[in-house]
Amino acid sequence: MKTALVTGANKGIGYEVARQLTGKGFKVFVGARNRDAGRKAATEIAGKDGKAIFLEIDVANNASVTAAAREFAKAADHLDVLVNNAGIIVDGDNAILEISDELLRKTLETNTLGALRVTHAFAPLLRKSKAPRVINVSSGGGQLTGGADGWSPAYCISKTALNGVTSQLATALPKFAVNSVCPGWVRTDMGGQGAARSVEEGADTIVWLAADAPQKLTGKFLRDRKEIPW
Ligand SMILES: NC(=O)c1ccc[n+]([C@@H]2O[C@H](COP(=O)([O-])OP(=O)(O)OC[C@H]3O[C@@H](n4cnc5c(N)ncnc54)[C@H](OP(=O)(O)O)[C@@H]3O)[C@@H](O)[C@H]2O)c1
């Protein structure tokens, strides 16, 4: 059975990705830092006969990530798909010359280092897959092409750096497919209710990369199943 781990899967885009992958027959590990929220989400996603299992994982915390990899290995002997979805925008992330070191560090800790840390910890399990895939949920806000528009600078910098992580990992792991995705502007707690896209639309390219895209597609930044400039 194919296995997937989605971080930050207790709500928003991560929840929807976990739900769709469960529907496609994956055994899905519903990653969440909050136990109650994670358990509730896993139970809902599993429904009657789907395979969805809660996995406690705070991507900003090394010990939590290491413990999660150990827990995972008790329930499955390999990981086919890792979706690094957990992400934050920190309050006060308003202007590049006004953000504190602390705000930038906190943002990078989750959005950039978090994805690298989880990939590192789960690499031995991913290597046991016939076709390992890592999907980093990035943002058009991290695109350098076209220049910055000034919105949430720490968040955008963290996603630019996450795209750097994607590119580096794709080179370091030639048998893996490692890609960044921009889900578009999506109606979630982060995106707000005025956003243009539903969670189903936001999850589409991520689920496609997880389940259906060619394995040779790697080292790219995608939106709507198509490559976009970094
Ligand atoms: N919504 C958009 O318009 C949009 C656009 C571009 C990119 N994205 C990206 O899409 C991804 C999902 O965003 P979303 O819109 O679904 O946001 P969301 O509804 O706010 O969900 C974010 C998820 O990440 C989790 N998370 C945050 N920090 C974590 C940590 N340290 N460890 C584990 N989980 C953590 C949250 O857990 P808690 O519930 O415990 O806080 C939550 O499950 C993010 O990477 C975001 O940057 C979103």
Image (cartoon, grey):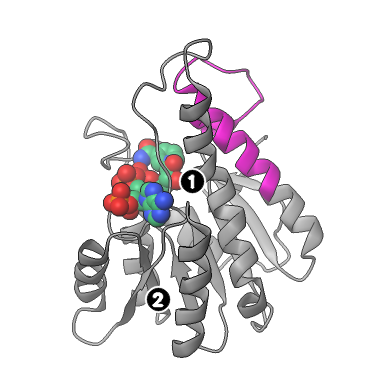
Residue 153 visible (yes or no):
yes
Which residue: 68% across, 48% down?
165
Which amino acid type is shown beneath numbered disc 2?
Val
| In the rendered image, the vertical position of residue 59 relative to residue 89, given as above or below | below
Q: Is the C-beta separation of discs 2 and 1 under 8 Å?
A: no
State left or right for residue 152 relative to residue 140. left
Q: Quadrant of the C terminus?
A: top right
**Residue with the mark numbered 1:** 110
Nearest the eye: 62 or 19: 62
Query: Residue 90 at what x, y percent from top left?
Result: 38, 31
Dot 2 falls on a residue whose secondary structure is: strand
Residue 201 visible (yes or no):
no
Residue placed furthest toward the top: 97
Which residue: 53% across, 10% down?
97
Quadrant of the rendered image containing residue 40 = bottom left
Which amino acid type is shown beneath numbered disc 1?
Thr
Nearest the eye: 156 or 205: 156
Where does the magenta region start and end?
A: 140-165
**Residue with the mark numbered 2:** 28
Which residue: 46% across, 62% down?
207
Membership of 159 in magenta stretch? yes
Quadrant of the rendered image containing residue 177 = bottom right
Which residue: 62% across, 34% down?
160
